[in-house]
Amino acid sequence: MSQEVAVKLGEASKSDTKYKQIMIDLIVQGALKLMEDEVSLQVRPQDVNLVRSLLDQASQAFTRTVQSASGVKKTLKLALDRETLPANSLGGVVVTCFGSMIKVDNSLDTRLKLCMENDRPALRAMLFPKRA
């Protein structure tokens, strides 16, 4: 089942419009967990140019989110990290700060693993229904 979902996620990363919004959302979510002024982003080599074009949008989305939630205007400086995710990964982003000492793994691979683990009871019930 996870392989089927991985194929679907791989297809989503090929759709520019969908993937751009996914990347912005993943960057903002990771930055919100860190709440630092400067963070670095690790992405797949094939996503570097895409993410570079989204840095301002993601930073503005972060500022809007923080301001609407707390009333405080907080800015965020985003930079691409030299270290990248494996080229064969599903995509997404790892958000880091303090020289990569603190990381928020928002890669699609990790998110898929988390979903599969967290939804294991529901999946088990669907695959193996109790017999009356």
Image: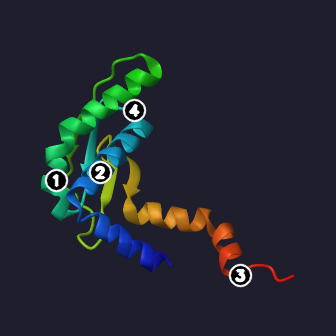
Q: Amino acid at mark 1?
A: Leu
Q: Position of residue 51 (x, y in %)?
A: 19, 50
Q: Position of residue 110 (x, y in %)?
A: 43, 63
Q: Amino acid at mark 3?
A: Phe
Which SS class for mark 4? loop
| Callout 2–callout 3 Cβ contact below 8 Å | no
- Nearer the observer: mark 4 or 3; the answer is 3
Spatial separation of the CA atoms under disc 2 and disc 3: 35 Å
Residue at the (36%, 75%) spot, across then down = 7
- Crowding at dot 3, Cα within 10 Å, few <14 / some 14-19 / many 20+, comes out as few
| Callout 1–callout 2 Cβ contact below 8 Å | yes
- Crowding at dot 2, Cα within 10 Å, few <14 / some 14-19 / many 20+, comes out as many
Spatial separation of the CA atoms under disc 3 and disc 1: 42 Å
- Nearer the observer: mark 2 or 4; the answer is 2
The residue where tag 4 is placed is: 35
Residue at the (15%, 47%) spot, across then down = 52
Which SS class for mark 2? helix
Q: Position of residue 115 (x, y in %)?
A: 53, 63
- Front residue of 51/122: it is 122
Mark linked to residue 37: none
The residue where tag 2 is placed is: 23
Q: Amino acid at mark 2?
A: Met
The residue where tag 1 is placed is: 50
Specify the quadrant of the image occupied by residue 14: bottom left
Which SS class for mark 1? helix
Classify residue 113 as left or right of residue 88.
Answer: right
Spatial separation of the CA atoms under disc 1 and disc 2: 9 Å
- Front residue of 128/26: it is 128
- Front residue of 40/54: it is 54
